[in-house]
Image (cartoon, rainbow, N blue to C red):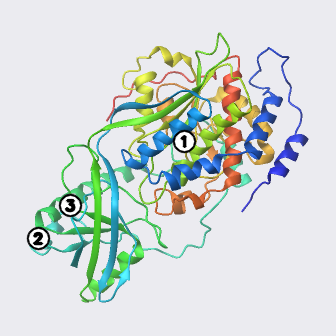
Amino acid sequence: MQKFLLTVAAAGLLAAPALAQSPAGTSQSSEKPDAAALAKIKDEGLNRSKVMETAFYLTDVCGPRLAGSEGLARANAWAKKRLTDYGLANANVEAWGDFGRGWDIDKSYVAMTAPYYHAMIGVPKAWTPGTSGSLRKQVAYVNVKAEADLEKYKGQLRDKIVLLPVATPPQPNFEPDAKRLTVDELQKMADAPAGGAPTAANRPAEANPEARRAAMLAARELRQKLGDMLLAEGAAAVLSPGRGSDGTVFTTNGAPYAADAKPVLPELEMSSEDQLRLIRLVEAGVPVEVEMETKTHFQTQDLKGYNVVAEIPGTDKKLKSEVVMLGGHLDSWHAATGATDNAAGCAVMLEAVRILKAAGLKPRRTIRIALWGEEEEGLHGSRNYVKNHFADPATMQLKPDHEKLAAYFNLDNGGGKIRGIYAQSNEAVKPIFTAWLQPFADMGANTVTLRNTGSTDHISFDAVGLPGFQFIQDGLDYFSRTHHSNEDTYDRLVPDDLKQASVVVASFVYNAAMRDQKLPRKPLPAAVKPQ
């Protein structure tokens, strides 16, 4: 795996072309970053980094951080204290509005006990109830492809653990799990025209997204009808297949988080290999027995969602009321500790503001960090923050602070190092970002693309005409192994990648805070009514 050593990075800094500096007391042009400030940022971020320590606390210590869970509350409190310890002002855990029920796992166990014993990999689906004690029951295989298939299972499922089919059996994979973006791939991104439908970073655009959406909605409706039938028939629990293979289980929710959500059965999302073994045995006529116990509990006393915010106050009398923001989402899924999604992004953002404070830099504009809650369920934390502070995309009636936001920078595509930035169709920022990336070319970050990317919190800002940007990152094994899976742990993080990302982010944020003008904006979008 490609790495860079601190001594090499420092040598690269000394060898880099000198950047022009403004005389003391004058502002910096956006095309000429302050070389002395950059040297301080690199020195602090590469030689005295705290990013892995932060990642350890957010993952191993705070644990899984599902929306509304005790783990997310721990992380919120820890982040607020850490930001205060770094010397930031106005650190706060700020409510953005009503979310719904939180949910936590207290116990989870599943094994096949007949025809022989075999411990299996299974994760409770989020917002599903527990089993009210240990179950040891026969399994029944239910394969429903259309609504008409439901009828043939009625009267056969009482007190059974229901086994659902595996839609896509695992196949041999001849490609590496972890990948870095190649020079050719980055060049194609740099050459791409502005626009394009927003897609998750490092994933190709779909040929027919509307058809896929229609198929997903139809499948969801059929699954709801199946769930209603299983509950009415008195089934004991459900084992459903998780996407993934080789022991990786990508998790989802098995019920809504709304406070008034309908009851559902206890449900585990299983490894494909374990699920397929059970199916083969049942279809061969071999009696199969499963033992399982899940214990979960709901958080219903506080139904609000929260963001963590803090500031480095600006020092320029004319510009300190303007704000440069940086952020990532603090919530995660529950099967692991949410390291690459998105403790990594949050750790980098926390490290970026730590670097700026430790380096003694004095930004002209105020710098505000935001660690978003409830992103995984629909960007709720950032969308409602934008709605509360800047504008509602449904009306496009602008609040006074809309004019004061200089930029927002986001990180949320795994634990890979930064290779550049998505300009989000904002052609005017491309030369600015190109200049800002120049000092990091030797670290592999030199690509500015006009392409759009979506699926994370900068979209909330872009939706109301604010300059919001997501960095380009190496994908590593994000989509193949860690994204929403039981393998998203601290051990998947690459320390040198996160150190590199931290200094890039700190530099971008500082440059935006020092620039004479706010970053250029695209035309305001039209109001979009929620669907």
- Disc 2 from disc 3: Cα separation: 13 Å
Q: Nearer the viewer, mark 3 or mark 1?
A: 3
Seen from the viewer's position, the closer of residues 456 and 463 is 456
Residue 85 percent location from the top left of the image: 59, 35
- Disc 3 from disc 1: Cα separation: 35 Å
Specify the label residue 154 is tagged with. 2
Residue in view at x 29 percent, y 38 percent: 303
Quarter of the figure with residue 420: top right
Check disc 1 and report the residue beneath it: 453
Check disc 3 and report the residue beneath it: 227
Residue in view at x 61 percent, y 56 percent: 493
Going from the N terminus, do you reach mark 2 or mark 3 first? 2
**SS at badge 1:** loop
- Disc 2 from disc 1: Cα separation: 46 Å
Q: Amino acid at mark 2?
A: Lys
Q: Where is the N terminus found, in terms of image quarters? A: bottom right
Q: Is residue 244 left or right of residue 394?
A: right
Residue in view at x 88 percent, y 46 percent: 11
Specify the label residue 363 is tagged with. none
Q: Is residue 421 above or below residue 108?
A: above
Contact? badges 2 and 1 (CB < 8 Å): no
**SS at badge 2:** loop
